[in-house]
């Protein structure tokens, strides 16, 4: 870099002096918490796509089918024993997953079960003890089953599985694009929060209008991205059809899984008759 | 001024910075170079106090910047005033309803009077030649104009260090040239410049010292920019250029 011909005469004086600024200790709790929560979501999505993460080792369409059957059976059964057996099975599967994943799934299941229990409390007090406990345990089983499915399967594989079940293409596309844009816009808003934090060097009297500005910019950005994608789709000759490129084959694990689902189906009929 | 000793940082299980040692003196103009994903942007985030090292130490003006200290609002706000960060994507930096408010955002928080705020904003707008945009919505400006507004926002805080992440990206040649001259002027005025860039044509104009990152997320060279640009083998080794470097303009046949 050559400085010989550069003049700084047009620089304002205050910019040439060092700032004697004494910062205030005003807390930016909301910004910090927002950064943390967006960061958590982004790392979860990124973790699913990291090279080390192979996702489910089972056939995904089968896993989706099995989970839906299990949820259906749990919803239809009147046998408390059957629900307990399903819960024990789900907890056994959960215990075989890694600790972080187990904690996340359990946290979600427990919190939703807790709120269900609160909702069922009046029925419990009025004497419908059996139904209240039954519904609460059914909720626990359903959420845990869904948690296990979503945490053990990549989202891209899930959308492909939906195609196998002849779910309309437009639905799959919307789901696929939503997941993609949650990540992209999440990253964008994370950077905006970082910028807000870096520029918040003192007392911000209009904190909430800054946050509204971030929300507005993210909205405008999403609109722009949606328009760009629409044009790109048109240019690439998009016909609205979602092509399946799944060449996965059945392995011994998949046959074992089919067997387990069959056992649950038998148990469902058996306890239904008892 | 800035002292990084044996700094390591990783995202989950992915290493981004591996045992980085770097010392930057007041008034220096440094370029961070390296292939995509080698850790330049992470280092800039660390210098700005967005993240803190997993291992090693980061010192600013002799004071160690730790995770605990960054939790202290008073300390982190002072650090953010002293080190200004110009993001790669200017859109992420602009969130106010007008260019004027955007540039006034920082000074208003510093507790200076409204007349001083206006004085600073006018100076910054004039310095960057964007006076006519003062009442415009930042989002609707062009890429180059947004970059100028983003720089004005940071300058209005009068930081000692200016950190720029790929400032030339997406700018037309004229604006790039303008930015180079402007950065030179800022450096001459005493501001320390840390710029991450891939622009091999302009890097020697905005820095006199270049820090080269390898794909192993370590610093592989720290030397004069002119010398680094001559070391073609080294640039090839870090995957920054290919065998055609130094690139020559050839007519299309």
Image (tube, grey):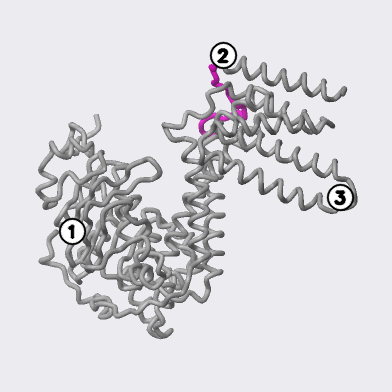
Q: Residues within 10 Å of mark 2 (few under 14, many from 20)?
A: few
Q: Which residue is mark 3?
A: A123
Residue at coordinates 43% horizontally, 64% vertically from top-left? A197
Q: Nearer the viewer, residue B171 or A109?
A: A109
Tell me, for residue A79, which label it has, or none: none
x, y percent for residue A165: 68, 24
Q: In terms of secondary structure, where does tag 1 sit?
A: strand
Residue at coordinates 56% horizontally, 54% vertically from top-left? A219
Residue A139: quarter of image: top right
Q: Residues within 10 Å of mark 3 (few under 14, many from 20)?
A: some
Q: Which residue is mark 2?
A: A252
Q: Is residue B83 visible?
A: yes
Q: In terms of secondary structure, where does tag 3 sit?
A: helix
Q: Chain of mark 3?
A: A
Q: Nearer the viewer, residue A70 or B111?
A: A70
| For residue B30, side relative to residue A67 (left or right) | left
Label 3 and label 2: CA atoms lie apart by: 46 Å
State yes or no: discs 1 and 2 in contact (Cβ < 8 Å): no
Q: Which residue is mark 1?
A: B23
Q: Which residues are magenta?
A: A234-251
Q: Is residue B168 visible?
A: no
- Between circles 1 and 2, the one closer to the viewer is 2
In the picture shown, does residue A208 fall above or below A138?
A: below
Q: Could you tell me which quadrant the C terminus of chain B lies in? A: top left
In the picture shown, does residue A249 fall above or below A50?
A: above
x, y percent for residue A250: 57, 14
Label 1 and label 2: CA atoms lie apart by: 58 Å
Q: In the rendered structure, does residue B243 fall within the stretch colored magenta?
A: no
State yes or no: discs 3 and 2 in contact (Cβ < 8 Å): no
Residue B47: quarter of image: bottom left
Q: In terms of secondary structure, where does tag 2 sit?
A: helix
Q: Could you tell me which quadrant the N terminus of chain B lies in? A: bottom left
């Amino acid at each position: 870099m050559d400085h010989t011909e550069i003049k700084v005469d047009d620089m304002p004086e205050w910019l040439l002096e060092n700032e004697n600024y004494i910062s205030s200790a005003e807390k930016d709790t909301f910004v910090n918490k927002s950064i943390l929560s967006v960061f958590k979501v982004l790392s979860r999505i990124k973790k699913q796509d990291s090279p080390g993460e192979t996702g489910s080792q089972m056939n995904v369409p089968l896993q989706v089918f099995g989970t839906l059957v299990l949820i259906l059976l749990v919803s239809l059964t009147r046998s408390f024993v059957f629900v307990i057996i399903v819960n024990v099975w789900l907890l056994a599967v959960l215990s075989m997953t890694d600790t972080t994943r187990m904690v996340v799934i359990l946290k979600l299941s427990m919190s939703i079960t807790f709120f269900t229990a609160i909702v069922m409390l009046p029925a419990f007090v009025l004497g419908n003890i059996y139904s209240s406990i039954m519904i609460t345990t059914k909720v626990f089983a359903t959420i845990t089953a869904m948690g296990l499915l979503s945490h053990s399967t990549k989202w891209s594989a899930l959308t492909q599985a939906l195609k196998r079940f002849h779910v309309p293409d437009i639905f799959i596309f919307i789901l696929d694009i939503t997941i993609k844009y949650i990540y992209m816009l999440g990253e964008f808003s994370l950077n905006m929060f970082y910028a807000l934090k870096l520029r918040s060097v003192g007392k911000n009297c209009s904190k909430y209008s800054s946050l509204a500005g971030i929300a507005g910019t993210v909205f405008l950005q999403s609109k722009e991205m949606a328009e760009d994608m629409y044009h790109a789709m048109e240019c690439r000759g998009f016909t609205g059809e979602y092509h399946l490129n799944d060449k996965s084959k059945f392995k011994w694990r998949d046959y074992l899984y089919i067997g387990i689902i069959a056992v649950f189906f038998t148990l469902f009929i058996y306890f239904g008759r008892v | 001024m800035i002292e990084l000793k044996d700094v390591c940082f990783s995202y989950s299980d992915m290493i981004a910075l591996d045992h980085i040692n770097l010392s930057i003196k007041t008034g220096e103009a440094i370029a961070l170079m390296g292939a995509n994903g080698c850790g330049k942007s992470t280092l800039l985030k660390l210098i700005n106090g967005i993240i803190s090292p997993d291992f090693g130490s980061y010192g600013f003006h002799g004071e160690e910047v730790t995770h605990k200290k960054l939790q202290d609002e008073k300390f982190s706000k002072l650090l953010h005033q002293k080190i200004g960060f110009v993001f790669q994507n200017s859109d992420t930096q602009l969130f106010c309803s007008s260019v004027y408010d955007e540039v006034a955002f920082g000074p208003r928080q510093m507790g200076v009077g409204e007349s001083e705020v206006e004085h600073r904003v006018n100076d910054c707008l004039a310095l960057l030649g964007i006076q006519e945009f003062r009442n415009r919505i930042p989002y609707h400006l062009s890429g180059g104009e947004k970059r100028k507004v983003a720089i004005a926002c940071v300058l209005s805080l009068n930081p000692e260090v200016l950190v720029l992440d790929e400032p030339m990206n997406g700018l037309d040649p004229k604006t790039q040239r303008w930015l180079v001259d402007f950065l030179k002027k800022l450096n001459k005025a005493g501001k320390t410049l840390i710029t991450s860039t891939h622009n091999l044509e302009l890097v020697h104009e905005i820095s006199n010292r270049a820090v080269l990152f390898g794909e192993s997320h370590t610093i592989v060279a720290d030397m004069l920019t002119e010398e680094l640009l001559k070391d073609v083998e080294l640039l090839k080794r870090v995957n920054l250029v290919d065998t055609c470097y130094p690139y020559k303009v050839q007519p299309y046949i």
